[in-house]
Amino acid sequence: MRSVNKVILVGNLTRDPELKQTTGGQSIVTFGLATNREWVAGSEKKSLAEYHNIAAWGTLAEICGKYLKKGKLVYVEGYLKTRSWDSPEGVKIFRTEIVATDMIMLDKKPKEDDEEGFADFLPGGDQNMFSPEADTSK
């Protein structure tokens, strides 16, 4: 039987992205994203914030690390992944996060000064190439 593991979120960054390199030289970035859900219960409007941990790899990680900042509004598409490790105390820790495969910046277009170098990440100058699948260097 087929299954689906797909996540689509639109929200604001809760912290600046943290860009790192693996020992093999692969780029990885992590950041937090907050989404809000609103509904009406009776005549009362209610709201609830959810906080998500996001990770992105490769060229997408480099783009996120360079252009995203705390508070920015973004669209993130990806899949859920749970990883585990043992703490120094010997306790098994589990963390479920979203591995981003696509990202679109939804804030207003940056000033021309802020765009400098952006084309370096875009194969053929295509500004819609935010997906690691589009990275032909792999």
Image (tube, rainbow, N blue to C red):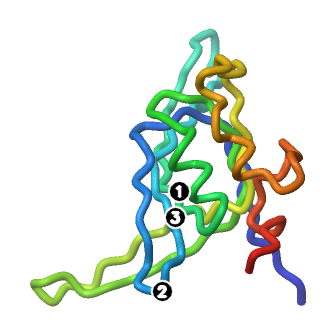
User: Residue, x 59% and y 14% (percent of image)?
Assistant: 45
Nearest the viewer among 127 and 104 is: 127
Secondary structure category for the residue under label 3: strand
User: Residue, x 68% and y 48% (percent of image)?
Assistant: 76
Q: Do the CB atoms of the residues marked 1 and 2 lie less than 8 Å apart?
A: no
Residue 83, numbered label: none
Judge the density around disc 2: few (<14), some (14-19), many (≥20) Cα neighbours within 10 Å. Answer: few
Q: Quadrant of residue 93?
A: bottom left
Nearest the viewer among 98 and 106 is: 106
Which of pointers 3 and 1 lies earlier in the amino acid sequence? 1
Residue 123: x %, y % from top left: 83, 56
Q: Do the CB atoms of the residues marked 3 and 1 lie less than 8 Å apart?
A: yes
Can you say whether 71 is above or below 103 in the image? above
Which of pointers 1 and 2 lies earlier in the amino acid sequence? 2
Q: From mark 3 to mark 1, how far is it between C-alphas? A: 6 Å
**Amino acid at dot 3:** Glu
**Amino acid at dot 1:** Ile
**Amino acid at dot 2:** Gly
Write down the residue under mark 1: 54
Which of label 3 and label 1 is nearer to you? 1
Q: From mark 2 to mark 3, how far is it between C-alphas? A: 22 Å
Write down the residue under mark 2: 24
Residue 97, numbered label: 3
Which of label 1 and label 2 is nearer to you? 2
Quarter holding the N terminus? bottom right
User: Residue, x 49% and y 79% (percent of image)?
Assistant: 25
Q: Which residue sits furthest top? A: 43
Q: From mark 1 to mark 2, how far is it between C-alphas? A: 21 Å
